[in-house]
Image (spheres, helix red, strand yellow):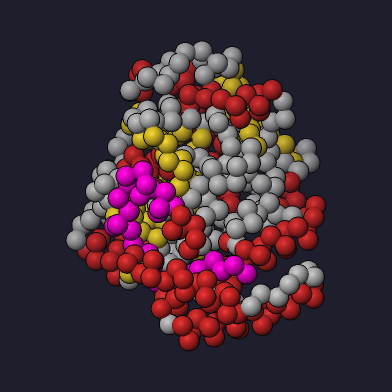
């Protein structure tokens, strides 16, 4: 059975956790391939709600092996706290596998992230302050600390010394902060080593062998397409590649082994943090979407910015990811509107533009061009099939499908695991 990729097709927070959990009972491995604890997934199982930040959503499926791939950056304290929280709630976490090549978020990465963002003032990016960006920067600059380094104190010490040679100069001379002691960092990191060791493995080998044995492997992106470092709304992006190509580099599984790429779309649009957002609402409709949709960041705790569905970015996500399917979430939130605007194009300096502009300046000035679709008043949370939906809800889904460029194969009609309509099963 070939591998599947499941990723966000907007700015994140689309409901990837629910989609992954829905598939979790049918797959053998669920793999996080990028990002860190700056991502958050909410999964509702029965009357239980789970907020996952670093762990793959598949950890809630008993028959599934959750994997943290080499493309993820790991804060050991967050990892162990999340594992402990799940264990206390009766969730078996013993099957977790962690790539020895994944990079560690060190205390100095977190410090630099916070002070740099404060220093930027009004030019700040909107980072979560969890050290994600500085850790990826260390990785690219080849001064990063990997999980495997925790098991060689000599190498670990050398690498921390090399990193702090420069970082302490920045902290003390540019930001007027106290220098960080090498031995303090090494001691803290070594304190995590034995607790993490049972999970550390050669995940590249394990995943490729699993595919050789016709096991089902699901790759789970941490953020959305428009937050991709290369293909997102730069510089208001994350520091890694949540797009489909990142699944290959972040796990060591080749692209020819992936046959299905599923994009998660909200029935409207949200984003957290700074950056352009053409359909953002500043009126009572925006507040209603925020309230009804419970739009508060799982990781950040910040209210999400809310707006109407943007078909331009949906088409873009289809193109850059090679999407084969969409999972449309939170359709139930739209119940109650007389008519629902959908952004079908942008107006930029008097010109109609139907594809995402490559120019950052143009995108900042883009104004949405709306078409208005009839709404519905009925509660749709009990719908089990597409035909159970009100006619106007069906028409809304069909219109979004046509505008976005890939079939909608599943629809979320409520937060629960069982509140999903499957039109075309993913497996």
Q: Position of residue 411 (x, y in %)?
A: 41, 31
Q: Is residue 381 above or below residue 202?
A: above
| 269, above or below 374, in the image | below
Residue at (66% x, 75% y) in the render: 180
- Which sits in the foreground, 375 or 161? 161
Vertical placement of residue 133 versus 164, above or below: above
Q: Is residue 425 left or right of residue 130?
A: left
Name the residue at the left extreme: 213
Q: In x, y percent, where is residue 178? A: 73, 72
Camera-nearest residue between 87 and 388: 87
Quarter residue 303 falls in:
top right
Identify whether 172 is placed above or below 273: below
Instruction: Report if residue 314 lies within the magenta region.
Output: no
Q: What segment carries the magenta color?
A: 82-108
Marker count (numbered): 0
Asked if residue 177 lies left or right of residue 376, the reply is right
* Residue 243 visible in the snapshot: no
Q: Is residue 227 left or right of residue 104?
A: right
Q: From the image, which quarter does the C terminus lie in? A: top left
- At a point 60% along the width and 42% down the height, the residue shown is 301
> Residue at horizontal 42%, vertical 71%?
193
Q: Is residue 85 magenta?
A: yes
Residue appearing at x 43%, y 27% in the figure: 414
Give x and y (percent) for residue 401: 46, 33
Residue 181 appears in which quarter of the rendering?
A: bottom right
Q: Report if residue 123 is visible in the image.
A: yes
425 relative position to 265: left or right: left
């Amino acid at each position: 059975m070939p591998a599947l990729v499941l990723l966000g097709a907007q700015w994140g927070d689309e409901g990837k956790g629910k989609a992954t959990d829905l598939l979790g009972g049918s797959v053998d491995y669920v793999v996080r391939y990028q990002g860190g604890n700056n991502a958050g997934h909410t999964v509702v199982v029965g009357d239980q709600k789970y907020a996952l930040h670093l762990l793959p959503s598949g950890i809630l499926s008993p028959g599934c092996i959750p994997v943290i791939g080499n493309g993820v950056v790991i804060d050991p304290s967050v990892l162990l706290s999340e594992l402990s929280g799940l264990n206390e709630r009766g969730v078996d976490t013993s099957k977790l596998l962690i790539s020895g090549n994944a990079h560690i978020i060190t205390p100095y990465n977190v410090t630099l992230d916070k002070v740099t963002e404060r220093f930027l003032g009004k030019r700040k990016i909107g980072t979560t302050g969890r050290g994600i960006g500085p850790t990826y920067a260390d990785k690219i600059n080849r001064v990063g600390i990997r999980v495997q380094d925790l098991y060689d104190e000599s190498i670990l010490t050398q690498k921390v010394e090399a990193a702090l040679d420069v970082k302490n100069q920045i902290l003390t001379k540019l930001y007027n902060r106290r220098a960080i002691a090498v031995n303090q960092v090494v001691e803290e990191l070594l304190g995590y080593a034995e607790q993490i060791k049972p999970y550390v493995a050669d995940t590249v080998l394990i995943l490729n062998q699993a595919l050789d044995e016709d096991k089902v492997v699901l790759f789970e992106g941490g953020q959305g397409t428009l937050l991709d470092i290369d293909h997102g709304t730069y510089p208001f992006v994350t520091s890694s590649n949540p797009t489909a190509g990142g699944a290959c580099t972040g796990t060591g599984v080749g692209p020819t082994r992936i046959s299905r790429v599923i994009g998660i779309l909200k029935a409207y649009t949200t984003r957290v943090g700074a950056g352009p957002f053409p359909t953002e609402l500043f009126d009572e409709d925006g507040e209603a979407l925020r309230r009804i949709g419970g739009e508060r960041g799982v990781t950040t705790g910040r209210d999400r910015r809310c707006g109407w569905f943007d078909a331009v970015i949906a088409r873009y996500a289809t193109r850059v990811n090679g999407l084969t399917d969409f999972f449309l979430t939170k359709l139930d939130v739209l119940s109650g509107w007389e008519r629902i605007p959908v952004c079908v194009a942008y107006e930029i300096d008097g010109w109609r533009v139907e594809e995402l502009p490559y120019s950052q300046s143009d995108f900042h000035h883009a104004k949405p061009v709306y078409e208005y679709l009839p709404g519905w008043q009925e509660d749709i949370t009990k719908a089990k099939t597409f035909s159970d939906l009100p006619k106007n809800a069906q028409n809304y889904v069909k219109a979004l499908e046509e505008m976005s460029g890939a079939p909608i194969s599943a629809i979320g009609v409520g937060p629960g695991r069982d509140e999903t309509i499957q039109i075309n099963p993913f497996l």
